Amino acid sequence: MEAKLTRSLTENEQYLALTIGRGMDINYRHLVIPALDNCDALIVNIKGLVNQTELEDSVISPLLNKQELPRGPRLKNQDDRFTRLIESGISVSGAKQSQLWTEICDAIVSGDSVLFLDKWDKALILENKGYKLRNISEPTTETETRGPKDGFIEDIMSNMGLIRRRIKDYSLRFETLVVGDRSKTEIVLAYIDNLVNDSLLNEVRSRISRIKIDSLLSSVYLEEFIEDEPYSFFPTMENTERPDRAVAAILEGRVVILMDNTPFALIVPAVFWNFLQSPGDHYERYYIGTFWRWIRLVALFLALSSTSFYVLLTSFHQEMLPTALALKIAADREGVPFPAVMEAFVMELLFEVMAEAGLRMPKAIGQTVSIVGTLVIGQAAVSAGLVGPALIIAVAVGAISSFAIPSFSMSTSIRLIRFPLLFLSAAFGIFGYLGGIIFITLHLLSVRSFGTPFLGPVTPYDQGGQVDTLLRLPRWKMLTRPWAGRPKDKIRQKDDLKPRPDLK
Amino acid sequence: MRKITVLLISISMLLVSGCWDMREINELGLVMAVAVDKSTNYPNNYLVTVQLANPKGGGATGQQSSAPTGLWIAEAEGKTIFEAIRKIAQSSSHRIMWAHNNIIIIGESLAQDDITPVVNFFTHNYELRMKTLVAVGKGKAGDFLTATVGMGDVPGLSLSDLFRNQQFTGQGLTSTMLRIFEKFTSETTNPIMTALSFSKVITQPGVLDKAENTQKQIRVEGAAVFDETKLLGYLTPEETTGLSWILGDNPNTVISVVDPEIPVRATAIEVSNVKHDITSQFNEGTLIPKINIRITGVGKLSEDHFSNMSITAYKTRWEALLNEQIARQVEQAIAKVQKEYQSDVLGFGDIVHGQHKTEWHESIKNNWHNVFTEAEVNVEAYIDIQSSALYQLPFYNYKARGSAYDHD
């Protein structure tokens, strides 16, 4: 039995004070309404969340200034008079009556105002949220040269608006789930009703609704609760700050999960190749898009194995180096006091330390860190003879390559896997390295993301999926929607759209 | 729990193995070249000389990365080659590594004895590559490791470049360990390898003959012909060119053709895309095969004094001269190995064996040596002179032109 309002304003106020307290940000505004024979009234809201001006103009002043109720059909009882007053005197767009305390309190804490009247066992919830929002600005983590420059912000309503502005389809659905006993975070599943795979949608719903937690503060909280392989190094969900990327995913029949208070949307399901793709591939001509994808694939390989290769070539398989290069590296390493693996591990570690320092430190001392980093660690270490210059190149190549991977979460995963691979290479040479690579491949083959094999459509192979995986074919070739989302409706566009001169 | 145990054991395997077999690259002495000689004191011993690279001037010492790589040359004697190598290791600060060895030079006196131990050792060692070049050094092989090769810093490296460049001089026998090994395993074919000798170059401007102004310089000079395992003798560079039409890997040879009607001016034709086809046939009643060699290729005019951009006027005439000259060159070279050395370095035995199995097994197999020396060899060349590689009209030799050719 849920608690309901009483007809006494004093009792209601006391109940409210017990439930949400009388903190300085909570506004209890007492009024006397002349139109209702000087009935006592109370408006409660949270100062930081409501639009005060709108409240004054549209609620408080009409109520205070209206001397009598407008004429109309005979009013049977007191409740009818209240309703008549509300309908005639309040000019807020969203208004809803409620009897339930939970509903009323939820409304207050999420930024609505609530009007109580003496001798009325209901309250009026007035939607006049008006908190300060960050402006929609360019995404900081995913920048594109030729794409749109707007990014998601912390407010879920604005984010939904950004999506809605791009898809004017009636079938676009925003399905709301609330998770978190204390944070009551709104989670919105965005999808196109007649495109999305039903089993995928049900899976997402059921995974989210089984979360029983007090609060969700970031989309990573959510990700960790619903991902397929909790122990895997690899992310199985895309995250993005870009509305265009989210919209593209929705149009592919995938589900985008928006969360209040985070500018990052999650996209499920995601396959491995999605992490090597970027909206920019579609914002340049297809040759360039394809070229970039392959560059990123090479970068992925280099980020993973540049130092491992250095160690295994210089410590085990010197015969695999061309003679001139072997002599050069041997000359460079002359007098280096550490074994190659130690050298490589320390430099890799220092790189990670520098990256971490650069990420968190105040901007003002950024210069100092980069100077110390490059000069002391790079040049001084080489000229002091502590490390060989070839290793510095290997570490730098790996580091730069890791930043060429568009997805930050995939990039950090790769940077992490580099270390076990380095030790395997140092212990067993190329056999260790290949063992590691085989293990990673087997693992990736076993992973699924919301039912989609993680390495698909490359393996398991799907011909139709190749148009937009490692290749980015011209738009008029992309007849089907990408494979990963398993959409209900596969056909994206009319066949034979290739432009040619004789077209009418 | 079980999973954790398995994980811990796997991790400890990494640590326990302790980087087994690890050796840092700067702790290795990379062998650039090796020479094997017969010991002068004990005829049954081997004298092994190795040339190790001593890389210098890395980043550690500063910015002198252009400093040349130093060399360390060591020699040791042993009853076996391996023993000698181990003895070198006694005085080497670096572990000797063979994988980068470029060339194996066999001393003349050892080659005259028997090269089997050398081939045996260097083909069975896992660190050595079968692509390593093999040559016979005229004189003491060890001397070649101290001489210079062209402008190269590391003689071992430059030697392999020198070999590679022989395809432009028409002496490009592919003299790798793999080829030698192939011929060793064949019943009838005998090894042939490149021969090295010294020439002198001027290091200081001055008179060539003055010893202090000259330096010993390695040059490729012909080829060494073997009878199964023993060195029989050498071929001159001209004869080597004759054989390289058949033995070389895609030779690219320049032939100077002299037109008998205009002997003053020769014409150079560069022949490439050379292919050969060897067939054997038995005439009725004889057991001696007839070997037919057909050489085809593409010729380009590289230096001439008569042509008029277009070669059509001379094509037939020069092709005939060229073909005749090539055929003569090949025939002379074959005659030398066939009659004088009596060694089947060209692999005719394998060809007869492959093409005439019955005859081979009936009568020839055990008597190949005699059959080979008596076999009739017929060489025909068909070079197609396709174009002139020149892009300007030659300065005509008017006198010659007037007498021999009629230009428009």
Image (spheres, grey):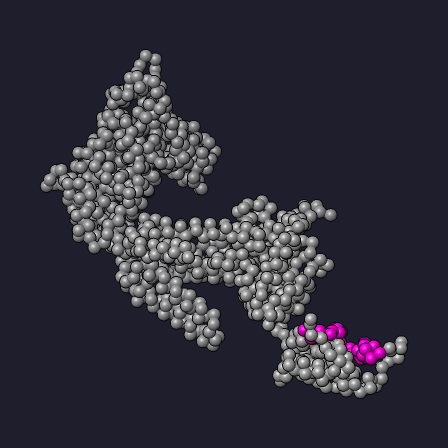
Where residue A13 appears, as percent x and y from the top left, is 69, 83
Residue at figure coordinates x 59%, y 57% from the top left: A268
Where residue A108 appears, as percent x and y from the top left, is 67, 77
The quarter holding residue A182 reads bottom right
Residue at figure coordinates x 83%, y 77% from the top left: A80
Q: Is residue B70 left or right of residue A270?
A: left
In this figure, what is the number of numbered marks?
A: 0
Where residue A114 appears, as percent x and y from the top left, is 71, 78
Taking the image as drawn, is residue B148 in sight? yes
Where residue B388 appears, as percent x and y from the top left, is 44, 37
Q: Does the magenta stretch include residue A155?
A: no
The quarter holding residue A15 reads bottom right
| Residue lying at the far top of the rendered structure | B285
- Quadrant holding the N terminus of chain B: bottom left
Q: Is residue A220 left or right of residue A86?
A: left
Q: Height in image: B184 above or below B142? A: above
Q: Height in image: B269 above or below A428? A: above
Q: Which of B304 and A343 is in front in this view?
A: A343
Q: Is residue A98 left or right of residue A333?
A: right
For the record, the magenta segment spans A77-103
Residue at figure coordinates x 29%, y 47% from the top left: B100
Q: Nearer the viewer, residue B51 or B384?
A: B51
| Residue lying at the far left of the rendered structure | B41
| Residue lying at the far front of the rendered structure | A1
Residue at figure coordinates x 51%, y 52% from the top left: A447
Q: Which of A48 and B159 is in front in this view?
A: A48
